[in-house]
Image (cartoon, rainbow, N blue to C red):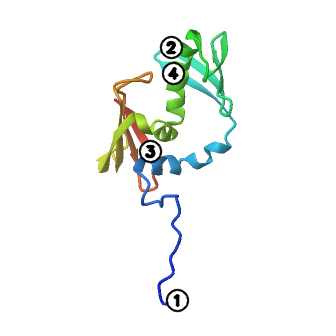
Amino acid sequence: CKTEPKKTEETAEPTETEKSVPERIAGAHGFDNWADVKEITFTFNVDRDSMHFERSWNWETKTNNVTAISGADTLTYNRNSMDSIALKTNSGFINDRYWLMAPFNLMWDANNYTYEHTEEAMAPISKESMQKLTIVYANEGGYTPGDAYDFYFKDDYIIREWAYR
């Protein structure tokens, strides 16, 4: 009928106001572009006192092939089919990838943690007032069950500081 208001089609995509805080953080860090990434190479370094430790990784994201380099040792494995050596190595990969890509893990791990959003909290390093997202992983499954993280961010949802606890 011409006198009835025109109906608009609803889209399946949530609007920015409908997205959860973890989704907004991941989005602000470029998660929407993840499908375009074919390969990532990075090195995880630890320096404590006079000790230095590093592991290098090459991750072919489409095939899930991972090459791990630590000292003189190199191991290439596929994350979809791992033996006991690959499983042990993969725990290091998961740890190092987490530190590299924490905002993306908010999406990848969404079914494995609970979260709480605090509108105003003091960030531990800068002592600035920021928003805080606390996530706590389930006590079962994964490599480090029960881990908890506090992510501090401003209104642009870019993580400024975070703490493992």
Q: Secondary structure at mark 3?
A: strand
**What kind of residue is marked 1?**
Lys
Q: Secondary structure at mark 4?
A: strand
Between residue 87 and residue 45, name the one nearer to us. Answer: 87
Which residue is under mark 2? 51
Taking 18 as reference, is 10 above or below it? below
User: Which residue is label 3 attached to?
Assistant: 160
Mark linked to residue 2: 1
Q: Amino acid at mark 3?
A: Arg
C-alpha span from label 4 to label 1: 70 Å
Q: Which residue is mark 4?
A: 46
Q: Are marks 4 and 1 in contact (CB under 8 Å)?
A: no
Q: Position of residue 45 (x, y in %)?
A: 55, 23
- The answer for how far apart the CA atoms under marks 3 and 1 are is 53 Å
Question: At x 53% / y 13%, what residue is drawn?
Answer: 88
| Badge nearest the viewer, 2 or 1 | 1
CB within 8 Å, label 4 to label 2: yes
- Residue 30 in view here: no
Q: Going by the image, does 157 lie left or right of 72?
A: left
Q: Earlier in the sequence, mark 3 or mark 1?
A: 1
Q: Closer to the N terminus: mark 4 or mark 2? A: 4
Instruction: First in sequence, mark 2 or 1: give its number.
Output: 1
